[in-house]
Image (spheres, rainbow, N blue to C red):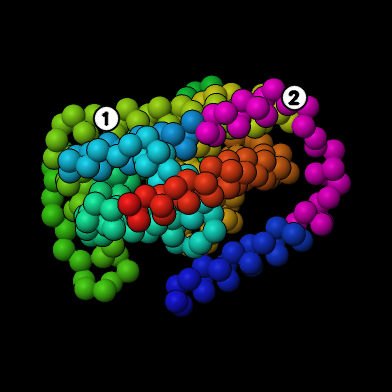
Amino acid sequence: MMKKLSGLSLFFIFLVIAFFYFYRNWHDFSVISIENYFDLLGAVILSFLILLMNGVLNKVLINKFGIDLSFREWFGLSVVSTLGNILTPFRGGLALNAMYLNKKYSFRYSKYAALTSGAYVIIFWINSILGLLACWYIKCAYGILNWYVFGVFLMFALFLSLIIFLKPKFKGFKNSYTSKYLDALNDWQLVCDQKNVFIKLILINMITIVILIFINYFEFAAFGAHINLIKLLFISVFGTFSLLISITPANFGFKEAFTIFSGVIIGLAIPQIIIVSVLDRLINFGLSFVFGVPFSLYLQRKLTI
């Protein structure tokens, strides 16, 4: 309960900060308007594809244990989970997935937690490697390099490569804050003890990253700004690391902070970054609500069958 209250408290604090920032800098935002609705439509369509890719990821992970989810199940779990993450702190939408799989297929909570943790090891590994490549390109093309960000990418790339290829076992202190991260590093092997599953997860994550890049491209283009795709790759992969601090509903505040920080590094204006972040939030909430509500009713009915 205290963890949920702390997450909600931070959410409202960030909300108040955002309100005052908008109020103090209203003139900077008032000159920004949507110029191309076709680009906006492109961002909406690609955001829908992200929901599909998240569902495919779920299907691949669960199918490993002989559970063949139907389209309405794996897509439904994706949109319901996304809506749950928006409405609750600490990525509460994942708990909804775990509850459904447990009640419908007797799939243990601990096993689902292990699958999710293991999948995140691969996600951060791929993003850190792509982050290094993006840093190298931006340094060569624009002479811009933030050594702190480069160091974060390098640290994760090297550390997770050792985890994936050497497969060590970590022991943590009971009830310690770091124990859940150590458990995740150990649990990834449950995900990838089959080579074909490992390759599928890499492909799914690579496709997802490409889609995210073009979502950002269309969102900026909707306001008349055309940003280099490698710069958008840098913003996208760095923003992924905000998942490590999923405290507030929809990771509100932390995701924006990561996006603003990475955007400023490559020379984007803060009002421009914020207005695109707001648009991204509206698109995700709209899609999650439109699809999440009916699919949550469908999954509830399916549990009674």
Q: What is the three-letter code of the residue carrying label 1?
A: Lys
Kind of residue sitting beneath label 2 = Asn
Q: Secondary structure at mark 2?
A: loop
Percent position of residue 194, x then y: 14, 35
Main SS, magenta region, reads helix
Question: At 82% across and 56% down in the image, what residue appears?
Answer: 24
Specify whether residue 50 is painted magenta: no
* Residue 58 visible here: yes
Query: Which labelled disc corresponds to residue 200?
Result: 1
Q: Horizontal and vertical percent for residue 166? A: 13, 42
Q: Quadrant of residue 171?
A: bottom left
Q: Is residue 45 magenta?
A: yes
Look at mark 2 in the image and give the residue it sits on: 36
In this rendering, position of residue 42 left or right of residue 248 = right
Q: Is residue 11 above or below residue 6?
A: above
Query: Which of the pair 13/269 is nearer the observer?
Result: 13
Give the image location of residue 120, x and y in percent. Answer: 32, 46
The residue lying toward the viewer, choosing from 131 and 64, is 64
Disc 1 to disc 2, C-alpha distance: 36 Å
Q: Which one is nearer the viewer's eye here, 146 or 152?
A: 152
Q: Say if 15 sits above or below 77 in the image.
A: below
Q: Residue at x 43, y 43 (%)?
A: 76
